[in-house]
Amino acid sequence: MNAKVKVIADANGVVINQSQNNPEYGYVRLEQTRTVIDDNGFLRRKAVSTLIQGEVAVLQASGFYAGQELPGNIVIKESMEPFSKKSPERDHKVAGETGILCTVEGAPIYRKTVYTTASNAEDVTIKHDNVDELRAAYATQTTNGSAIKPSAEFNI
């Protein structure tokens, strides 16, 4: 039910992007459209992306090109421990457009995506417990008119 993993170019058609901190290193962006069932049992299609990082010369030698299909999947990894000791905040799991961190007993959940060719790789997710905080944030969005209004034709 998942689409193939594809190499994605930026708006200028660039596939290999250089690091702003060190031009010897860079990354290639990958994307996969997946079929997911959310916590409410609702089926939807969702694009998931990740980066392959490495030395620019090695990335160039690998021959990546826009639209290239790769074997494997992009999987989600969530943890209560940061993936990066240097900048743990970059991997915080955030609830949509709210900017609110997803937490368990007040501790942040960390989330990253990785590309893998392992056929048995599965998502590892952690359910957050700050539901009331998120409901309040979504209620605020609804009163500000940014929420989608229900249609009589689509009544679940």
Image (cartoon, rainbow, N blue to C red):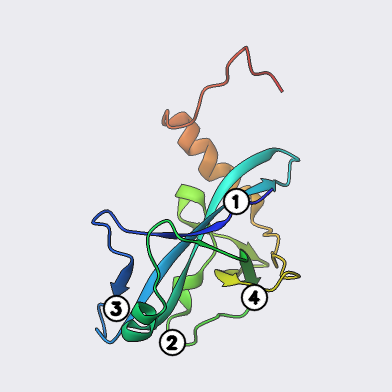
Q: Position of residue 125 (x, y in %)?
A: 69, 64
Q: Nearer the viewer, mark 2 or mark 1?
A: 1
Name the quadrant of the C terminus: top right
Q: Which residue is disc 1 drawn over? A: 3
Q: Which residue is disc 4 drawn over? A: 80
Q: Which residue is disc 3 drawn over? A: 19
Asked if disc 2 and disc 1 are in contact, CB closer than 8 Å, the reply is: no
Horizontal arrangement in the rendering, residue 143 relative to residue 59 (left or right): right
Q: Nearer the viewer, mark 3 or mark 4?
A: 3
Q: Of the residues under marks 2 and 1, which one precedes in the sequence?
A: 1
Q: Of the residues under marks 3 and 4, which one precedes in the sequence?
A: 3
Q: Nearer the viewer, mark 4 or mark 1?
A: 1
Question: How far apart in space, not on screen, are marks 3 and 4 (Cα)?
Answer: 28 Å
Q: Of the residues under marks 3 and 2, which one precedes in the sequence?
A: 3
**Residue 140 or residue 121, whichever sits in front:** 121
Q: Residues within 10 Å of mark 4 (few under 14, many from 20)?
A: some
Horizontal arrangement in the rendering, residue 90 relative to residue 156 (left or right): left
Q: Position of residue 151 (x, y in %)?
A: 58, 16
Query: Given the image, on which type of amino acid does mark 2 rest?
Result: Lys
Q: Of the residues under marks 2 and 4, which one precedes in the sequence?
A: 4
At a point 25% along the width and 77% down the height, the residue shown is 20
